[in-house]
Image (cartoon, rainbow, N blue to C red):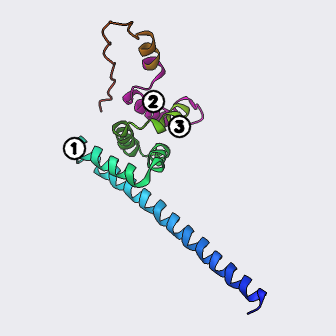
Amino acid sequence: MEKGSVLVCQQTSTTQLDHSGHIVELESYRQLHRTITELIQLSSCITTSEMQHRLQHATAQFGDRFTHQLVHALHSKDQQERQALTWLLTLLNDRVALPALQQMSQNEQLPRSTRLSASLVLAGMSATAEITDSSRREQPAAGQEIPQRTRLYAIS
């Protein structure tokens, strides 16, 4: 066998690996989107504990990509979809989402509804500037009682 034919074989097998890797990645991406779509559809008809279980399962399956994709989906123009996503992110309560949510809530180039959804998620996670600033000021001295955290809820 000549050197040239060995190189052709190596290039072919490398190309096949690259294509199969892209196919697996694409399928994983599709599965992530299917999961999020399913959770949005189920959000109006299952209990909070059932949804939390499904969210934990999806987080275990997809990792931080799941949280990042939920945050990205808040850009939806569909009000009911954004409302469901707000609830999902609040239930998930994943700190990985905080930087993106804070950026979205303050970005005046985004539609007001998207900024409001991001702000509601932050409030539901007790991560707004007002809440975190007040909790820092209320740090108890040694031997003092720990103050109750303020929880905000959105009612529709």
Measure the alpha-carbon separation of dots 2 and 1.
Answer: 24 Å
Q: Is residue 27 magenta?
A: no
Q: Residue at x 55, y 73 (%)?
A: 20
Q: Residue at x 37, y 29 (%)?
A: 124
Which label was assigned to residue 119? 2
N-terminal of the pair, mark 3 or mark 2, is: 3
Chain part drawn in magenta: 104-131
Q: Main secondary structure of the magenta part?
A: helix
- Amino acid type at circle 3 is Ala
Does residue 124 sit above or below 60 in this rendering? above
Question: Which class describes the residues within 10 Å of circle 2: few (<14), some (14-19), or many (20+)?
Answer: many
- Amino acid type at circle 2 is Ser
Quarter of the image where the C terminus is located: top left
N-terminal of the pair, mark 3 or mark 1, is: 1
Give the residue number, with chain letter if any, for mark 3.
Answer: 100
Give the label, 3 or 2, closer to the camera: 3
Measure the alpha-carbon separation of dots 3 and 2.
Answer: 11 Å
Give the residue number, with chain letter if any, for mark 1.
Answer: 47
